[in-house]
Structures are given as structure tokens and as C-alpha cells.
Image: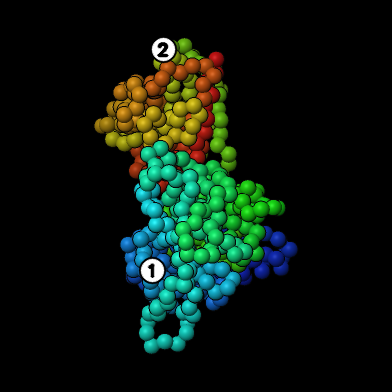
Amino acid sequence: MPRRRTLRSRWRARGVALALLCSCGVQEAPEPAWEACANLSAPAIAECSGVIHSRRHPGVLWVHNDSGDLPRLFAVDLSGTLLREVHVDGAQNVDWEDIAADDAGHLYIGDFGNNRNTRQDLLIYVIDEPDPRADSTQSALSVPVQRRIPFHFPEQRAFPDPLERNFDCEALFWDAGWLYVLTKHRSDTRTVLYRVSPQGDSLRAAVRLGEYEIGSQVTSADLANDGRRLVVLSYQYIHVFERPAQGDNFLGGRSQRVLIEARQCEGICFHDDTLLLTNEQREVFCVDLDALLQKGRFLPPAPEVDVPRVTAGAGIAALPAPAGILELRREPWVRREPAQPPSLRLGWSESGLSLHLTCPVDGDVVLGSQRLLQLMLGPEGERPALEPGQCVWEVALHDGEPRIQLLLPRGGRGAAATGHVALERNEGSIDVDALIPLQEQPTAGQTLGFNVIVYQPGTDAALEWSWAGSRSTQPLENPLLWGRVHLQP
């Protein structure tokens, strides 16, 4: 069996390909590929949570585990091979989430994971970066903590705050003598940037600089060595921010959003113009940032559609042919041969949303028991979420018979328990008509947040088609892209 190509060899191959393109007069960056180029081979690296490329020792990556591990770092080379395990004397790993490096030989370890928003002991450890390649008779080294930087978020009033659980933190970077952290929210999909002074050991308040609708939960960040670009990693995106002309609110600069196809990534860092990502499966991905930006891998803005009014009881059949059409797109996680997209149309009446779905199918497809679609609704145009007051409906087949059920809300206000659905099988397709009652009677001019996922009948694909696109392996928990539907008079 041929050996897996190492990270270094993949970079070399990428450089050769790029050189060939340039020699032919084609100034184009290589096509990015979401394929792991290395694996963190040491069994002790059980759940990699942070990664940084050394500024002092080229080709060395520092990584660490998530909460509950020993207070230790791992130095690995670009092939993912362990060079040295380093114990941090005087530290405790309550919940290490990210790591950063400065240009003076220090490493900063963020012990500020705060899933339940209950911690009042958030801090950053500072150590002198050791040389992992130094001669030693021991496989592990020990370095002492040089300084502790305790901090708190001044906006947090209770632990936890019953109304706002937005003080988890998993992202850390350094710039020009200052430390910066980004929050991971559990009440909304925003992130807040704070500045933390690295001086002194006394508790200090982090300084709020700005916030951004990030669309997901932030897990890591890094600033390029030249300070011009900040990358912010979330479960499904890489956000690239250009440094603003003035000040250090990096979230205020021009930004672009890139889709990740590398499972659940927890760490990100720069290595020259390449981004390195690590995921929970201990895989390492190397992606040329410029190639990623040039290849149009940005997610489009969330779409909007006008939904016409229909006569109660008449349904979609009463609408003109082009009205209320939602253009479905294929989900990138499904790796089967392309199929013809389904057709999905919406209308509304005082009874709720009327939906007509036409799915092309092969003549010999057996319709057994499976989902047909899941639909999420957010009130007043808000992003749909798994929260009381919002709706998740499912249309499914049970032994070939269609059923519709309300999966959420739990404890919602006056939620309808049932809807109406009918299925008709035609030559080459199946047609589904459904009436989705809403929690509150719809009115003309109303806007709803909307996300729908359509499952291809007769297959076991986890996802297939969507409007706006969830771009997630857990679409109900993380509908990253969504749109708005406007109820027309």
C-alpha cells in the first residue's frame, strides 16, 4: 500500500504545479482541495483544540488537547509526527481552547472555555517557547508558567446569565503586544472581539472592540504574521477579515466567508500564505488561502423570496406557474452522482403555508420509511433555531404513507400539533402537497426566517437539496445559511 503523502510533500507538489502554471503564462492559484494532508499520529493527542505555527522554529506546530487533559503541549512537524511533549508546570487544563505566539518567543495558552457560562476564572497562561528539537535524553520537557493573565467579560453580570449565554470563548490571537479573544455564543450567532492586556497578573476587564454576525460558533482564530489578515474559524466557515485602516477592531474590516468541507474543525493558523486546520478526528488540512478566495468558494448571501397569497383550501394549484418558487441547491456533503433537483413552491393563507414538492425518482424506487423534508421557521425574519417559539416541521414516509409532524417547539406558544399532507406518485416523480400551520396566524407583509432541506426519495443520503443551504452535518442544530420569505398581499 502506498504511503500517505505528508503535509510537506503536498506543499512541494502544490508548488511544482503552481510553477508549471506560471511558466505557461497562466497566473492562477491551484484548486483548493478538502482532503486531509496529514494526521496527528500521537495517541496522546486525543482531541486537538488549538494549533499555532512556531515563529521561532520553522516547520513546528504547537497543538493541545481540549478540557480535562494534563497541562501539556505537543510539538509536531509538518507531517503530523510528534517531536516532543511539553508539560506546563504550574498550569491546569480546565478547558484549554486556543494557543497563540508572539514575536518575542512566548506562547499564550487560552484556558477560557466556558460552555455553561459559569466560569469566573478565565485566564491565559504565558510560557517561554522551548526548542522541541533540542537534544534531550527525555521524550518530554517541562517549562514553567511565566505569567498568568486572568480576565473577565465586563458585560457578564451573572454566572450563568439566564438571558444571555454569550461568554464562552475558544479563539485567541496576538498582535503588537496585545492579546485578542473572540466569544462563542450560545444565544445567537454573533461573536464579539475583545482586547486583553498581557501586562500584570491582576484580574482585568477585557475591552470590547466590536461584534459581527458570524453565522456559527467560533472555535479558533489567527492573525497573519504581517498583521494584514485575520482568519476566524467556526464549525462551518472560515471568515477572512482585512485589517481596517485605523484601530484594532479587526471585525470592522472588509470580510469574506468561505465554506469548510473538513468535518468539525477546532484549530486554525497561518503558515505563510497557507492555512492549517485541525479537526476533532486529528486530521490536518492545508489550504492555500489565495486559491480559496479566487475559486469563488464564498457562500452567497441568504436569499429572499416573495410568497403569494392563495385562497384558503385551494392550495398551490391556484397560483400562476412561476409564483413562489424556491431554487434548491445540492448539499456539498452528499457524494453521489448529481440528480435532477426537486421543484418546491410556497403559498400562504390564513391557515398557514401551503407547500408543493415535486421530486424526480426512478420508476423502480421503493418508497418505504424515510424523511422527505425538514422545514424550519423563525419568527419576524429571524434565523431559524432550535428554540421555543420557533418551528421545525418534518414530512416523512412511513411504509410509503406520508405523515407530517411538528418536531419543535418545546413549550412554544399555542403550537399546532398537526398539519396536512398528501402524496401522489406519478411516472418519474412523486408530488407532495402539505399545509404547514403556523404558531400565529400569518398576515400580509409578514416576513419569516426560513430553511428547508429536501431528502431524495429512495436513497439513504443524509442531506440532498436545500433552499439557502444548511451546509452542516447537523442541519437542525446548525442551519448556517437561511433565507427570508415575504408574505405578499
Q: What kind of element bears circle 1?
A: loop
Residue 192 can be seen in this image: yes
Q: Residue furthest left?
A: 399
Residue 313's disc number: 2
Image location (x, y in percent) of residue 243: 65, 54
Which residue shows up at 48% across the image and 20% down it?
Answer: 347
Report the front residue among 247 and 78: 247
Numbered badge on residue 464: none
One can see residue 395 in this view? no
As drawn, is 306 to the left or to the right of 478?
A: right
Q: Residues within 10 Å of mark 1 (few under 14, many from 20)?
A: some
Q: Quadrant of residue 73?
A: bottom left
Q: Earlier in the sequence, mark 2 or mark 1?
A: 1
CA gap, disc 2 and disc 1? 67 Å
Q: Quadrant of residue 412?
A: top left
> Which residue type does callout 2 highlight?
Gly
Q: Nearer the viewer, residue 268 or 403?
A: 268
Q: Which residue is mark 1?
A: 91
In the rendered view, tell whether residue 479 sits above or below residue 120: above
Coloration of the structure image:
rainbow
Residue 130, horizontal then vertical, whole percent: 48, 78
Judged by depth in the image, the label closer to the viewer, 2 or 1, is 1
Which residue is at a point 49% across and 26% down the rendered structure image? 380
Return the x and y of residue 212 as percentages of the image width and height: 56, 44
